[in-house]
Amino acid sequence: MDIKAALRAQHIETPSWAFGNSGTRFKVFAQRGVPRDPYEKLADAAQVHAYTGIAPTVALHIPWDKVDDYADLARHARELGVGIGAINSNVFQDDDYMLGSVTHPQARVRRKATDHLLECVDIMDATGSDTLKLWFSDGINYPGQDDLRARQDRLAESLARVYGRLGEGQRFLLEYKLFEPAFYATDVPDWGTAYAHCVKLGPKAQVVVDTGHHAPGTNIEFIVAFLLREGKLGGFDFNSRFYADDDLMVGAADPFQLFRIMFEVIRGGGLRDEVAFMLDQCHNIEPKIPGQIRSVMNVQEATAKALLVDREALAAAQSAGDVLGANAVFMDAYNTDVRPLLAELRQEMGLAPDPMAAYARSGYFEKIAADRVGGEQAGWGA
Ligand code: LRH
Ligand code: MN
């Protein structure tokens, strides 16, 4: 395996919303220089690609990134040297969706929700994106509040309507989440539910694994291995957490877990374009562009370490039942300092060896902090 070739071909997708203000229900802290519109978000995302060389696409979130001319936004992205990645729908911020969106008891509300999802497919057509990412906050807070099975019927019907609209080369990724904002039952709570719906729908429907959406103690790399084996792993929403859906920088809370996940990706043949490696994070208190650069580097480091696993030695130890031997092969790779290798690779790619230092030296932040005065800073609009 030509490790450098694999690393050079790596493709991490940044989320437009990571460049806007974000926070918790307690406080959303505003930061200087935050973008006021999707054009400025793309400019910031292009900085991440400029210094890492492996973040060439940006995911959009609708309506947070609503513009009059999506083709023009895609042109702007190209001028900046990036492309439009996954289109994220949003049926979780409208008063009509209090009791659900695609699973709501009333057909009128379900129609409104699926109409938005179809509008997102139109935006895929206009921007050249081939991926629609679907996350539903749908769920209930109290036992008896609604019929769990009927909600699954409604979900299946709504997903089928969207599936039917997908064009050639287009797909949707169904995201699951254990809880929040629903606190008793979520309609797509786990990988099994997402997988079952996607299998029923067909090859254009796959599962996205958000690393912050599992019960504590969940073996996420097992889910990754399983979905890859089934050809149903569509991608990742990378972030990390100590407790719940904290949306912290990927690899920050548990770099060993990220390494184990990337090992299963490589072992399962998933280090290829069909699997979308997206970041889904919120930089509530840290500077946003450096936060994204650090996150891309964390995925790159975990990938480099996972590529260094001596697969032959591992297979030999595994088949010999050499428990400690096999674990040692695995840990040797994890304990390898790959930073010199990555610094060398960046220089071979014509980049500065240390992206964080290079970005800090660029003066880009000082420029946007001075230029972006007035107007409304972007955020979740929640
Ligand atoms: C839900 C989620 C989903 C996005 C949102 C920004 O928690 O992970 O992927 O739409 O965050
Ligand atoms: Mn997510």
Image (cartoon, helix red, strand yellow):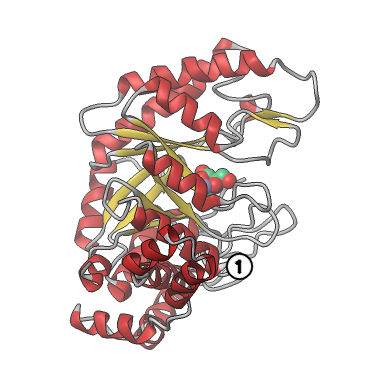
Q: Position of residue 123 (x, y in %)?
A: 31, 36
Residue appearing at x 34%, y 84% in the figure: 362
Q: Is residue 290 left or right of residue 83?
A: right
Q: Kindly give the residue lying farthest to the front in the view shown.
A: 320
Visible in this render: residue 64? no
Kindly indicate the quadrant of the structure image that contains residue 125. Answer: top left
In front here: 76 or 299?
Answer: 299
In front here: 8 or 225?
Answer: 225
* Mark 1 lies on residue: 253
Kindly indicate the quadrant of the structure image that contains residue 189. Answer: top right
Quadrant where the C terminus sits is top right
Q: Is residue 22 left or right of residue 332?
A: right
Residue appearing at x 54%, y 51% in the figure: 220
Q: Is residue 103 left or right of residue 159?
A: right
Residue appearing at x 43%, y 62% in the figure: 320
Q: Position of residue 80 (x, y in %)?
A: 24, 63
User: How many marks are shown on the rendered structure?
Assistant: 1
Residue appearing at x 53%, y 65% in the figure: 323
Quadrant where the N terminus sits is bottom left
Q: Residues within 10 Å of mark 1 (few under 14, many from 20)?
A: some
In this rendering, is residue 18 above or below 90?
Answer: below
Visible in this render: residue 213? yes
Q: SS for tag 1?
A: loop
Q: Position of residue 361 (x, y in %)?
A: 37, 88
Kindly indicate the quadrant of the structure image that contains residue 346. Answer: bottom left
In front here: 25 or 302?
Answer: 302
Q: Is residue 263 left or right of residue 220?
A: left
The amino acid on which the numbered mark 1 sits, given as a three-letter code, is Ala
